[in-house]
Every structure is written in C-alpha cells, then in structure tokens.
Amino acid sequence: PNDFPRRVTDDHIRFEKVSFSYGGVKPTVKDISFSLRRGQTLGIIGATGSGKSTVGVLLAKMLGYSFVDTDLIIQQVENKKLYEILRDNGTEYFAQVENSVCKNLQANRTVIATGGSAVYGAEAMAHLKSIGKVVYLKVSLAELNKRVKNFETRGIMRKEGQTLEEILIDREHLYEKYADITVNCSRGSLSKNAEKIIKLLNKSDCVAGNSD
C-alpha cells in the first residue's frame, strides 16, 4: 500500500489508477481511482455468511488500511470460541460483550468486520457511525443457505430453534437502518464485490472523485 500512487491533502488521500491482486499474480481489480477522507474507518455489517471478514480483508488491502474482526476480539477477551460463550453464558451475556467490544473500539484508517448480531447493540452502532461509514453486505437467503453449513458451531446469536431465515427477518431492518451504503453481494466474486463497495464509496460523502 505504501507504493500506491497517491496525492495527500489536509482532508483526503487520493489514489490514482490502482490495481490489486488477491490470491494470485494477475490483478483482480484494475485501474481504480478513488479518494478517502483521512482517518476514515469502514464498518462492515451483514448476516452470517455475507462475507464481512473476507471482503473486509480485501478492502483493507485495497485501501492500505488495517483490518479488525470484532468476533476475534470477543474470543480473545473471553478466551473462548463464540459458540462456547453462547453455550456457557447465553445470548444476553454475548450481546453485552459484543456491544462493549464494538463501542470501545479505537480505530483509525481501519476496516472493521463485525459479527452478524452487532446491530443489536445501539451503542456499538452509534460508535461505528461516529468514526466512519457503515457498509451493509446484503446477501439473499438462498445464497446464505448455500454458504452457512456449520450452523451449530458457527457462533450465531439466536433464539432457541430460530432458523437462518428467521434470524435474517429479525435483523434485516437493523442492517438497513444503520447502513450508510448497501451493497448486494449475492453474486459476483470477492474482488468484484469489493470493487462495487469502492465505487459506491466514491459516490458518498466519505469519498471524493470518481472510479475509473
């Protein structure tokens, strides 16, 4: 990232015709130009299986940002896997920990991938929106059913017996409520979805300029 062609002003960093590769030699994203406000963070929200962590890592690479996964922080704080916290302490306790972790994040120039249930924490979401933009990765139920196979051990905060469809119905209005940008990620490769996010960021007030 330090070798990217860029112009720095007091408020923005401008990247000119940058190409990226991810997991290969050939560029997967080519000749994108964009600007970001200095210090801007990106919070990623969405359902389990929407690709928050994988797309988040690629975005961080593209932007020259750090990357944080709040699920990993929760596991470090509690010294347990997510499903173990839910099993041993219950959903109410898990929600409190998740809200506390997210609302106390001190981040700068960072992509933050949150857990699917982070949107239940009003303080957490208010904090994420105060330090940057929130991007919702929207994925259809049919696609989520294909992606989410380890339902019981994935560490999904849910009511007893609640299905993936019921979880999505319960949370979707919160994803939409808190999102500054919504990106349909039901189709397309990892790099294409990351590119879509960059292009939409270019149209928002956290980014100046147009993608090429």
Image: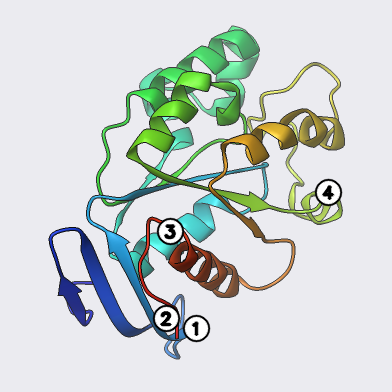
Q: Amino acid at mark 3?
A: Val
Task: Mark 1: give few (<14), some (14-19) or many (20+) Cα within 10 Å.
Answer: some
Q: Which residue is mark 2?
A: 21
Residues tagged 4 and 1 counted as in contact (Cβ below 8 A): no
* Residue 194 percent location from the top left of the image: 52, 67
Amino acid under label 4? Leu
Q: How many marks?
A: 4
Label 3: few (<14), some (14–19) or many (≥20) C-alpha neighbours in 10 Å: many
**Residue 68 image-quadrant placement:** top left
Residue name at image x 19 percent, y 58 percent? 11
Quarter that holds the N terminus: bottom left
Q: Indicate which disc residue 141 carries.
A: 4
Q: Secondary structure at mark 3?
A: helix
Quadrant housing residue 86:
top right
- Relative to 198, is 21 above or below? below
Residue 166 lies left or right of residue 133; in this view the side is right
Percent position (x, y) of residue 119?
58, 29
**First in sequence: mark 3 or mark 4?**
3
Which comes sooner in the sequence, label 2 or label 3? Answer: 2
Task: Residue 1: give its label.
Answer: none
Circles 1, 2 touching at the beta carbon (< 8 Å): yes
Residue at 25 percent of width and 73 percent of height: 14
Q: Earlier in the sequence, mark 3 or mark 1?
A: 1
Q: Name the residue carrying label 3.
A: 57
Disc 1 or 2, which lies upstream in sequence? 2
